């Protein structure tokens, strides 16, 4: 049973924007912090952004600060990642994730209880 479903990936030119969405089952969304990870070819999966379930506070990796925004719509059980000023180095498969605490996803190594199947984001130069 698929519980996290990403959408919104695609091909965009450098400097462009995309918005990723992650639809989650209600039970998972309401009881977990939510986040985004990405994995580029030949690289390990890395943390991108996370949002708390308590106060919607956010954490972002330094490389996307000022360009990406993470948000959650609790009424729709949906997580978003607004990506602006995209760069070729943002090219990766982006995964939605859920964890009991936001700090689990920002730790080293990062941990999550649930994962989506991923959506491809390709930024051309």
Image (tube, helix red, strand yellow):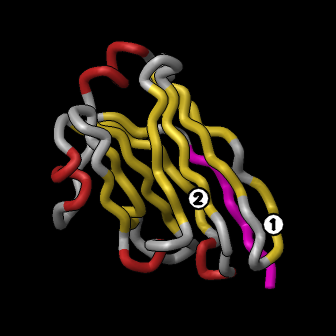
Give the labeled residue for mark 1: 12
Q: Is residue 11 above or below residue 61?
A: above
Which image quadrant: the C terminus? bottom right
* Circle number at residue 88: none
Q: Residue at x 39, y 57 (%)?
A: 49
Can you tell which of label 2 and label 1 is closer to the viewer?
1
Q: In this view, does 23 lie above or below 70?
A: above
Q: Magenta span has 83? A: no
Circle 2 Cα neighbour tier, 10 Å, few/some/many (<14 / 14–19 / ≥20): some
Q: Residue at x 81, y 62 (%)?
A: 11
Q: Residue at x 41, y 39 (%)?
A: 115
Q: Is mark 2 on a helix, strand or loop?
A: strand
- The reply, left or right, for residue 82 in relation to residue 24 is right
Q: Which of 25 and 81 is in front in this view?
A: 81
Q: Are marks 2 and 1 in contact (CB under 8 Å)?
A: no
Chain part drawn in magenta: 118-125
Give the labeled residue for mark 2: 93
């Amino acid at each position: 049973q698929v519980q996290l479903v990403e959408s919104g990936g695609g091909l965009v030119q450098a400097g462009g924007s995309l918005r990723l969405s992650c639809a989650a089952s209600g039970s998972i969304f309401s009881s977990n912090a939510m986040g985004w990870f990405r994995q580029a070819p030949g690289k390990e999966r890395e943390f991108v952004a996370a949002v708390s379930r308590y106060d919607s506070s956010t954490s972002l990796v330094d490389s996307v600060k000022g360009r990406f925004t993470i948000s959650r719509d609790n009424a729709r059980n949906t997580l978003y990642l607004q990506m602006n000023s995209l760069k070729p180095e943002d090219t990766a498969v982006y995964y939605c994730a859920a964890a009991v605490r936001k700090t689990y996803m920002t730790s080293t190594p990062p941990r999550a209880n649930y994962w989506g199947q991923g959506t491809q984001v390709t930024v051309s130069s």
